[in-house]
Structure formats: structure tokens, C-alpha cells
Image (tube, rainbow, N blue to C red):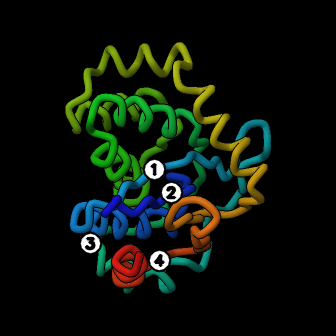
Amino acid sequence: MAAVQVEIVSDFTCPFSYVTEAALLRVGAETGAEVRHRAFELYPAPSPLPLDAEMDWKDALASLAAATGVSLLRPGYQSRTRKAHEAARFAEERGVGAAMRMAIYAAYFTDGRDVGRIDVLVEVGETVGLDRTELKVVLDIDRFTGSVLADEAWAERSGIRSVPTLLVGAGPESEVWVGAQSYAALRDAVAGR
């Protein structure tokens, strides 16, 4: 039996993406589901960043965050995330993609760090075993910018306007899910395919 495919379109400054990715990481490890990440920048340059990052999401996500073991604090600002998506692509190439993704989310939502800054991403990358110098060079020369922009173009063509968006299954029979998903819902969806 082939592994179930799950594509997730997400952004590192979206708390709904964070809890869903944490749950999906666990489901993937338990079921062997093939998870593919697609980049989506909530606030790509030159669009303005919101002045107030306060949103009424913390209470809505409390139970999902607790169930996945993630800590959610309000950073109080928004980061640009293109470089974070590029760093995650590089980490994936180096075999530590999942660890890097969770480390980027934690840097933003637990530590309140600006994950749009290369110096921050280099420090985060080092914690998951990436070479500082190599990651900095990759980010400085925009090695994965084209890949991130291709994901965003795909999302636009596909009509995806919010994150997280998941495509569970492959081809025309895949299901599209929008919004935060629990571990139990994801496990059941993968097990039912």
C-alpha cells in the first residue's frame, strides 16, 4: 500500500499553521504519510505589515497547542517570512527539514524572535545541525527564492488564499482542508485512505 500524500501550505507566522504542522509531524511519523510543505507568505514584500499583530487566536488554539505540545505566545509584531521558507528548504535538502520547521515556529512563537532576519535563521539552523556559514551563504544568494516563489504562484493558481491549507491524498480524489487541524482529525484522515 502506497503512503498517503499530504501537502500543507503554511506560513511561519501563522499560529494555526504551527499547531497543524506539529500535529502533522506526529501523524507522519506514526503512519508513514508523505508530507510535502508549500511556502506561503502571509505578508510578502512590498505589502505592508500589520501594525498590530494582536489577534484573538490564543484561546481558540489553546487545546490544539496543548495537545501538540507547542507553546504559543504573541510576538507583538509580524515578520516577513520568505527567508524562513528558504531556510526550511535548505534544511529539507540537508535532511533536517522537520526539525528546522519546528525550530523556526518556536523561535517566533516561543522566543519572540524575528524569523525574517538572516542572522536569527542562521542561529536557529545551527540548533538543528546546519552549518552556520553555509546557511548564511544560501540565504544571502537567494538560492531557494525561486522555489518559494513557485510555491506561492502554485497556491495562487490553485485558489489558496489562507493558511494552513492541506491537500490530503493525491490527484482528483484529494480532500482540501482549510484551517487548524487536530492530531486526531489528521490521523483519522490519513488512516482512512
Identify the image quadrant of the N terminus. bottom left
Q: Residue furthest front?
A: 1
Residue depicted at x 29% and y 29%: 94
Query: 163 or 27: nearer the eye?
Result: 27
Q: CA distance from mark 4 to mark 3?
A: 14 Å
Residue named by callout 1? 36
Q: CA distance from mark 1 to mark 4?
A: 16 Å
Residue type of the residue flagged with mark 3: Gly
Could you tell whether 103 is left or right of 165 in the image?
left
Circle 4/circle 3 CB separation < 8 Å: no
Task: Give the mark nearer the N terminus: 4 vs 3.
Answer: 3
Residue depicted at x 26% and y 72%: 69
Position of residue 83 relative to residue 141, above or below, is below
Residue named by callout 3? 69
Q: CA distance from mark 2 to mark 3?
A: 22 Å
Task: Give the mark nearer the N terminus: 1 vs 3.
Answer: 1
The disc at residue 181 is 4
Residue named by callout 2? 7
Q: Under tag 4, what secondary structure?
A: loop
Task: Give the mark nearer the N terminus: 1 vs 2.
Answer: 2
Place residue 129 in its image quadrant. Answer: top left
Query: 35 or 192: nearer the eye?
Result: 192
Task: Give the mark nearer the N terminus: 2 vs 3.
Answer: 2
Circle 1/circle 2 CB separation < 8 Å: yes
